[in-house]
Image: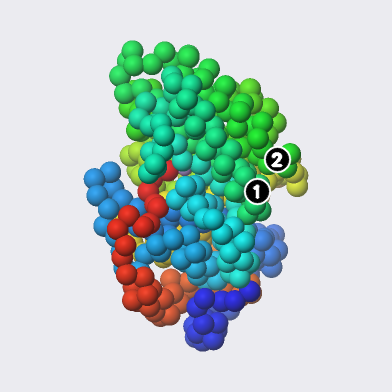
């Protein structure tokens, strides 16, 4: 595995911060020991954590109104892989890359596999795209794709998903994520039931093309671009469809795809209970599908989601392995910095959830000691586990402070020179 940022530079950066980190780590270790917790076990847990980076996230996304490209944006999938490699090199927490077709389509599959191997990366779930028309496409998705009234449009959308499976299979991926923007903007535009019947019919065609060891993740979203009725609007519809489509079909929870104040951790608990939790798109939101950096608005919610995942892992054992992926759109930050920060926020929630004393919590719950039950979660959430995360990075060959190391490397300045902007070259956006 070759490093993109000079490893000597990272070592120099770490050397400057190491003694302070060791002091903080020792202090935290002492405090956790008094609570009966072992910091070394938690650090090992943090080192084993992984969340995949979305290929579309390394470019500047856009608002609904405009896109303001940043300097040195990747112009093709190979340049995106370089940026993903930097994120993993410095955080040591993002070995997976989630691709998006046709944005990342390449005829040179061998070269793409080689690029992944070079950077120590693998391919997580691949994403299909039938929410926009591509150049040269025969039929338009203006009035739907997998749910379209036209059989020809549906057949084209099914075939695109099958093409994604085949490409993903050649790249070593094991799952397909399907999100469709299909729906209605006006009451009466659709027959609500017929739309879902057509969706299921189309998805049966997609599922039948899955290799035996593959899964398909159904991603729901409350609204947008269909503002009146979205075909797969909520986890209930997603669950019903995943159940209809059989054991290879599961549900994907994108944190931003819910109404404000929705109890997302309860949705996670429900899907885990019924064996249909396929994976996540981590991000954060204030009002709608904002695709903000994970943990930037509501870190407590992220913690509560991981608290449910910790509970499910205890119940289900090794077999419980939902896919963790980021899904963000960056308009005003450097995408590499935002993705590194988000990966660390998700890892933080994971480690904080491991601090919850589950035996004590169960006891408080049985005793109807509501205050202590809530405090058991709050104590874990309030604990600053930053030294554990930094030590995990240091031990795994990453940077103690990834953003500082990245800035001092001059990577973005260098890419701004090497990658002059090319109109429309970056496939990115809100998905
Ligand atoms: Mn998503």
Residue occupying the far left of the picture: 65
Percent across and percent down for residue 106 are: 52, 55
Q: Which colour scheme is used?
A: rainbow
Question: How many angstroms separate mark 1 from mark 2 (CA)?
Answer: 8 Å
Q: Can residue 75 be seen in this view?
A: yes
Q: In this view, does 407 lie above or below 311?
A: below
Q: Is residue 297 visible?
A: no
Percent across and percent down for residue 131 are: 41, 36
Q: Which of 56 and 373 is in front in this view?
A: 56
Residue shown at 53%/67% (left/top)? 85
Residue shown at 26%/57% (left/top)? 68
- Where, by quadrant of the figure, is residue 120 drawn? bottom right
In screen coordinates, is 388 left or right of 254?
right
The numbered mark at residue 211 is 2
Pointer 1 with pointer 2, Cβ within 8 A: yes
Q: Nearer the viewer, residue 299 or 419?
A: 419
The numbered mark at residue 169 is 1
Percent across and percent down for residue 45 are: 67, 60
Percent across and percent down for residue 376 are: 58, 47
């Amino acid at each position: 595995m070759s490093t993109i940022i000079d490893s000597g530079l990272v070592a120099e950066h770490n050397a400057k911060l190491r003694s302070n980190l060791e002091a903080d780590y020792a202090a935290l270790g002492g405090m956790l020991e008094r609570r009966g917790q072992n910091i070394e076990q938690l650090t090992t847990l943090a080192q084993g954590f992984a969340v995949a980076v979305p290929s579309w996230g390394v470019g500047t996304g856009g608002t609904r109104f405009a896109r303001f490209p940043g300097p040195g944006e990747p112009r093709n999938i190979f340049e995106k892989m370089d940026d993903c490699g930097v994120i993993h090199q410095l955080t040591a927490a993002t070995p997976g890359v989630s691709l998006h077709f046709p944005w990342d389509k390449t005829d040179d599959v061998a070269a793409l596999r080689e690029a992944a191997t070079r950077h120590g990366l693998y391919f997580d779930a691949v994403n299909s795209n039938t929410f926009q028309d591509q150049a040269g496409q025969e039929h338009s998705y203006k009035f739907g794709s997998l749910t379209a009234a036209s059989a020809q449009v549906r057949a084209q959308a099914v075939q695109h998903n099958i093409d994604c499976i085949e490409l993903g299979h050649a790249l070593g991926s094991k799952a397909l994520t399907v999100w469709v923007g299909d729906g209605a903007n006006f009451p009466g535009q659709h027959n609500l039931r017929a739309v879902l019947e057509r969706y299921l019919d189309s998805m049966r065609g997609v599922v039948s093309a899955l290799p035996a060891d593959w899964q398909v993740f159904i991603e729901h979203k409350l609204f947008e671009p269909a503002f009146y009725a979205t075909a797969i609007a909520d986890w209930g519809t997603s669950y019903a469809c995943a159940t209809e489509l059989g054991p290879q079909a599961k549900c994907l929870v994108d944190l931003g795809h819910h109404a404000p104040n929705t109890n997302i951790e309860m949705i996670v608990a429900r899907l885990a209970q019924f064996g249909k939790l396929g994976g996540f798109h981590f991000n954060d939101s204030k009002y709608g599908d904002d695709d903000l950096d994970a943990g930037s608005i509501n870190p407590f919610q992220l913690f509560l989601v991981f608290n449910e995942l910790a509970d499910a892992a205890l119940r289900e054992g090794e077999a419980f392995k939902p896919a963790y992926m980021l899904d963000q759109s960056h308009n005003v930050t450097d995408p590499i910095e935002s993705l590194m920060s988000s990966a660390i926020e998700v890892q933080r929630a994971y480690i904080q959830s491991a601090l919850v004393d589950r035996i004590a919590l169960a006891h408080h719950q049985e005793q109807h000691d509501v205050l202590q039950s809530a405090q058991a979660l709050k104590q874990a959430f309030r604990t600053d586990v930053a030294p554990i995360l930094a030590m995990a990075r240091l031990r795994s060959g990453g940077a103690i402070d990834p953003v500082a190391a990245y800035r001092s490397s001059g990577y973005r300045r260098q890419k701004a020179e090497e990658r002059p902007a090319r109109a429309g070259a970056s496939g990115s956006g809100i998905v």
